[in-house]
Image: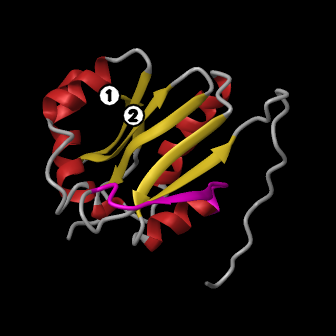
Amino acid sequence: MHAMSGVIELRLARAADAPGIAHMSRELIEAGLGWRYHPPRIARLIADRDTLTLVAEDRAGLAGFAILQFGDEHAHLVLLAVQPRCRRHGVARRLLAWLLESACAAGIAELGLELRAGNAGARAFYRALGFSDAGLLPDYYGPREAALRMVRVLRRSDGAPPAWHAPTLRRS
């Protein structure tokens, strides 16, 4: 396993990034599920004006990516992944911070996502960034593979942002 190679830079994805993003999704997110986010589908997401696709790069190449689809009031985090060599260096946090800032600027009220119900690390990551559990979706990823839906409220329906406090460390 290689160490992270230098400084991480974030930028908007280009069409040429689609194969790398798709392969990361297959290996790191969709493992054991079948491949749904293949290169042509990722290319369509990159080109979609209602979708924001970011990549994180270091000298070794693609370090991570995130895809957020915007609706009128709600946004959905479609995919987020970081190469194992780059984990625990703040890459996912930086990607998500960019997306949250973009969602707030766009007037989005709520950002939602789904993750494998058994992925305790991802759940802890999102909880630390202000997301709350919003429900269990049985068989979401196929037979016997449930998803946990999580949401982060960015503004109340009256337009005021909600109070948000830094999370405290709790042992479950």
Question: How far is disc 1 from disc 2 in space, using C-alphas?
Answer: 5 Å
Q: Which residues are magenta?
A: 128-141
Asked if disc 1 and disc 2 are in contact, CB closer than 8 Å, the reply is yes
Q: Secondary structure at mark 1?
A: loop
Vertical side of 146 occupied by 149: above or below: above
Q: Position of residue 86 (x, y in %)?
A: 35, 60
The residue that mark 2 highlights is 54
Q: Quadrant of residue 97?
A: top right
Q: Residue at x 48, y 37 (%)?
A: 76
As drawn, is 93 to the left or to the right of 107?
A: left
As drawn, is 14 to the left or to the right of 134?
A: left
Q: Which mark is residue 53?
A: none
Q: Amino acid at mark 2?
A: Leu
Q: Residue at x 62, y 54 (%)?
A: 131
Q: Quadrant of residue 147?
A: bottom left
Q: Quadrant of residue 170?
A: bottom right
The residue that mark 1 highlights is 13
Q: How would you rate the neighbour count of disc 1 (Cα within 10 Å): few for under 14, some for 14-19, many for 20 or more?
A: many
Residue 141 visible (yes or no): yes
